[in-house]
Structure formats: C-alpha cells, structure tokens
Amino acid sequence: MQRRTVLIGGAAVLAGSAGFGVYSAARATAGYAAYSTQLRRPLDPHGGVAELVRLATLAPNGHNTQGWRFHSSGRAITITPDFSRRTPVVDPDDHHLFVSLGAAAENLAIAGTALDMSGNVAVGNDGAIRFAWQSGTAKADPLASAIVRRQSTRSLYDGRPLDAGTLTALTAAGQRDGVRLVLLTERKKINAVRDLVIAGNDRQMSDPAFIAELKQWLRFSPASAIAHGDGLYSAASGNPALPDFLGRPAFDLVFKQASEAAKYAKQIDSSAGLAIFFGERADPPHWANVGGAAQHFLLEATHQGLACAFINQPVEVASLRPTLAALVGEKDLRPDLVIRFGRAPALPFSPRRRVGDVLTTA
Ligand SMILES: Cc1cc2nc3c(=O)[nH]c(=O)nc-3n(C[C@H](O)[C@H](O)[C@H](O)COP(=O)(O)O)c2cc1C
C-alpha cells in the first residue's frame, strides 16, 4: 500500500472517530437533558412524602455533596447531617453542611403547603431538623413551583440594575428572626466585596488540599454526573461537558489563579447586586436558620425571573470574614453567605441522588 493511501485511510479513521465522538457526545448531552427534566419535573401535589423529599433535595448545598439524610415517621420528617459527605478543607466546621440542611428544610416547608402537608420546621441544638406536618390546608404557592427551577447560575449576567420593587421583594424574602441580610447595589461596595472574593479565591487556589478536595467532586461528563447523582457537573458551571479522561487534564490546564480571578471579577461586575447573610450567632442551629432564609430569598429571586450564584470565598477563608463583616456594618457577626443576583439565561441543572438513597421510613 502506498504511503498516500495509508494517510488517507488514517484520516478517514480519525474523521470517523471524531464523528463518532461528536455523535456520542450529543447523545450523552441529550441523555443528561432527559435525566434533568425528570429530576426537575413540576411538583406532583399528590406525591406525598417521597415527593416532598425530592423537592427538599433540590436545595442548594455546598459542592453538591448532598450531606443530608431524611427520615419519615408518622407525620414528621427529620433531616440529619450525613458526615460521610463533609468537605473538611473548604468547610472544616460543617458550616456549609448545616446551611444546606436549613435550605432543604425550607423546601419542605414551602412545598409542604402545596402538597397538603403544611407544617413547621424546628431546629435542634445539634442542627438536626424536624418538620412536623398536617393535612387539610393545601395552597398553591409560586415559591413552591420555583423550587424545581432554582439553580446556581455561574455565568455572566446582563449588568442591568433591578427596580426598587424587586429589591424590596428580595429583601422581604430573606428576612427571618436570628438572621441579618444586607443587600448591596452600590458599585463601590460591590467592588470591595469583589476584591475579597478574588483574595479568597487566590488563597484557596494556592492550597493543594483545597484543589484536591474540589477535584473529588468534579463531574466532567454527563454520564459521570448521572452515575454519581452528586458533585459539580461542568455544564452546570457554564463549562463544556467532556469525557472524564479529557476533563481532568483540561481542568489542570485551564484552572489557573489569574483566569479564575478575571472570571469572578467579570461575573460580579455583571451582577445587579449582592446579598450577604449573617446569623446572629455562629452555631449549627443558626447556620441552618440562615440556610432557610437564603433559600427563601433564592426562591423569590427565581420567581422574579432572576439568576443567583454563591460567591462564598470571603466566608470560607476565615481571615477575610472580619473585613467583609466590617465593610457592611456588621463587624461583630460572622458572615455566612455571599450571593450575587441579576438577570441571565439558565444553565444546565446540577444532578441529584435518588430519593431512595437519602430517605428512610419507619
Ligand atoms: C452553604 C453553601 C455554600 C456554597 N458555596 C458556593 C461557592 O462558594 N461557589 C459556588 O460556585 N457555589 C457555591 N454553592 C452552590 C453549590 O455548589 C450548589 O448549590 C450545588 O452545586 C448544587 O447546584 P444548584 O444550586 O444549581 O442546585 C454553595 C451552596 C451552599 C448551600
């Protein structure tokens, strides 16, 4: 066989495998879209406890580890931490874990009303949560419908400010006893927080333990996101989905301090404002309470057609907390959450584990 024939044959094989690659990537993406549509289907008002827990698990949670367990007994659902899913580097005192539990409990309370299972949330001293419900008071609630549409949208927003009415509705949604919410729309203050986010990000990216922990929770391909049902799926963070064997080296290549800093600066500059949450005390019940208030805020934002994303670097890097708190006039409190908001199209949704994996019944 002549050299030219071999080359043409080789090119054909390459083109064929590239074509197959494109075809199978398209199939995998379509498969993820179907998985996500099922995960985020509108709530079924007759779905009972399993449906209520499905909606609770759609709450935001640190690194999408879903460090929660649900137990249903009679007319009560308890949520307890699953410490096997902690992230000790980014969250050494389980602050994010308890915030996430509180956000899940807020979904129980809001969805419960729409499912004829309305009830009350009680947080114990250890941060475990009990939701006791009763029937007979079903009521449609736009925030309940927003649960399946809420997401962390980690992209550029459109840069437009929000009107006063929308800001008032957001502020009201995030109010709660024991929680303080500061909304920033003034550019000078937003810029100061942006600088703290970048300082925190620089610190985290220079810590090999932080990177190693983060990598454990990255899911590059749709198949891996579906198989794990947890973690940070590339496409849900606005990055291309890739086969896992390509995703890991690509991540090492592009995940650099300077480019991440530039990305965060642009994202924050494009946002209409920031919401900063403080619990009045720094312990698991107050963290869970902050999670509930923040989730109420996020659902109101979703209902208003807004996008939100967490930028928590200045609360994760402990040495930056006092500067952040002082910047917004809360120098005696530990800041719990920083969230940016604005307008942007939705990204692909993040995965979740199955209800059967997190719910036990007495
Ligand atoms: C306490 C807490 C801290 C978080 N911190 C960050 C953060 O610093 N950066 C980020 O991009 N997302 C952060 N998130 C968002 C989670 O990664 C996100 O909720 C999770 O991946 C699930 O995705 P979803 O919100 O789109 O459902 C945080 C969420 C919670 C509850």
Image: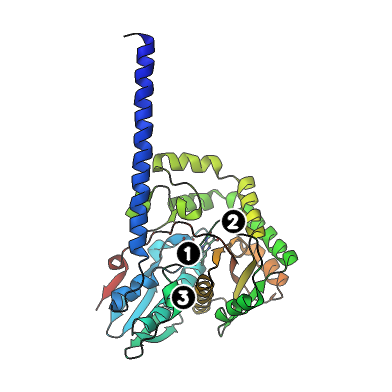
Residue type at mark 1 is Gln
Q: Earlier in the sequence, mark 1 or mark 2?
A: 1
> Which quarter shows the N terminus?
top left
- The answer to whether the residue labelled 2 contacts the one labelled 3, judged by CB atoms less than 8 Å apart, is no
Q: Nearer the viewer, residue 177 or 319?
A: 177
Q: Is residue 231 left or right of residue 180?
A: left
**In the image as oriented, which residue stretches furthest toward the top?**
2
Query: Which element type, helix, strand or loop, lies under badge 1?
Result: loop
Distance in Å between CA atoms under marks 1 and 3: 17 Å
Mark 1: is the Cβ under 8 angstroms from ligand 1? yes
Residue depicted at 46% across the width and 70% down the height = 100
**In the image as oriented, which residue stretches furthest toward the left?**
362
Q: Is residue 151 left or right of residue 185?
A: left
Mark 1 lies on residue: 151
In front of the other: label 1 or label 3? Answer: 1
> Which quarter shows the C terminus?
bottom left
Q: With respect to residue 271, does 138 lie above or below?
A: below
Q: Nearer the viewer, residue 338 or 149?
A: 149
Mark 2 lies on residue: 156
**In the image as oriented, which residue stretches furthest toward the bottom?**
136
Residue 289 in percent (x, y) is at: 51, 79
Mark 3 lies on residue: 102
Q: Is residue 228 among the parts visible in the rendering?
A: no
Residue 207 in percent (x, y) is at: 57, 50
In front of the other: label 2 or label 3? Answer: 2
Decide: few, some or many residues near mark 1? Use Cα within 10 Å; few <14, some 14-19, many ≥20: many
Residue depicted at 68% across the width and 76% down the height = 330
Residue type at mark 2 is Leu
